Amino acid sequence: RRVHGGSSRSFQFGFAMPDDIWSDILSSSVKAKPTLHHIVVVGDRQSGKTTLVSAMEDSSNTEEERLGVCMEYTFIDEKNPANGDSSNRVQIWTLDGDETHTELLNVVISKKSITDLLVIICVDFAKPWLIEQSLERWTKLIERAVEHAWTELGDPQKKAAAQQQLLEYYQKIRLGDAAKSLPKVEGEDEDDKKNFTIPLDDGALVVNLGVPVFFVATRTDVLNSLDYTREYSLNPELHDLVQQTLRKAALKYGGAVIYTVAKQSRTQTRLIREYAAHRLLGTEFDHDPEDANRECIFIPSGWDDLSKISGLYSKDRKMAEVFTGAPRTSYIELPKPVETPSLT
């Protein structure tokens, strides 16, 4: 048998093939290597991290209780905003909340990923009395891992550029909010407003990691449960105090705050995925902030300030003082002592 169309070469199989057939096959089958982006998801054990990531993947198993072990990995292919091709791969690493696994942060937050990284810190609203200590713990661990990665990279200019990019993005959002209230000056055009800069607010972007951070609250609908309210003797002020605590932490890192519910809302998880793509890939993003609906809060980076946050809860109290029946100890399981058999 002969294959027509150009010069041919005979093979022992008894037919001939064009000289360029293999290059044609290779060029059509080998896809361009995707551009890699990275998301690291952290939080205490059973705080909804794995379920959140599953929902971001559009998985059908989001309502099942899934427990991660040490470190989980998955990825999402996002379309290139320039040509529509799925040439951007977002790698998602989910760290188990056990104390013994935190050193794995240096594996995924490394010199290879630090310049194209986003961090998600999950806090569980089903255990709001632990939120303060959880935030303190994970922000410190992330700070340490990010600084280690920048040091490992050994390029101060890239670090400074990443920090400047984060600052400029934050200022751009703040400017968009502030420019609406700027007085119109005779002879001024819109470009003049775009060039206007404003100083950072008190408490805003105090720690610039050079990496965007999302603070995601899981199971926010639990606080509205009447049985839950009675069990822990909660008062209505708790909602505002919890939100205030979370937003203050996010403001410090120039981060965003996003609420999700126990049975993952496709709307909120889709928002997280789209906002992550926007921050990592520069895709279009057009979602208004939401600070009224207690189950669907969305505070984008750069929108918040202390004046908005302070209006939530005016009393100088911590969350542990609001609870009368909630446990005070961490639910992170500590290693059990090894029992040695007695000699007889």
Image (spheres, rainbow, N blue to C red):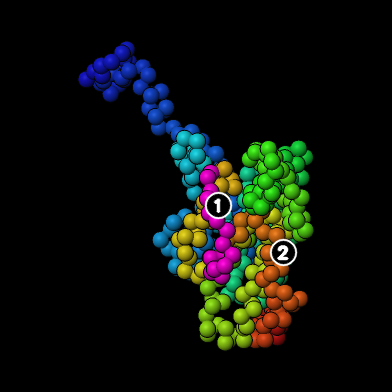
As drawn, the label of residue 327 is none
Q: Where does the image place residue 33, in percent across and percent down from the top left?
A: 51, 35
Residue at figure coordinates x 62%, y 83% from the top left = 234
Instruction: Label 1, secondary structure: give it.
Output: helix
Alpha carbon distance from label 2 to label 1: 25 Å
Identity of the amino acid at label 1?
A: Tyr
Q: Is residue 227 magenta?
A: no
The residue labelled by disc 1 is 275
Left-right relation of 132 to 32: right
C-beta proximity under 8 Å, tags 2 and 1: no
Dot 2 or dot 1: first in sequence order is 1
Identity of the amino acid at label 2?
A: Ser
Q: Where does the image place residue 317, in percent across and percent down from the top left?
A: 74, 77
Residue 40 visible in the shown view:
yes
Q: Is residue 75 above or below residue 331?
A: above
Task: Choose between 98 and 207: the one closer to the eye.
Answer: 207
Q: Is residue 147 above or below residue 310?
A: above
Instruction: State how many labels appear.
Output: 2
Task: Choose between 105 and 226: the one closer to the eye.
Answer: 226
Boundaries of the magenta span: 283-297
Residue, far left? 1
The residue labelled by disc 2 is 307
Residue 111 visible in the shown view:
no
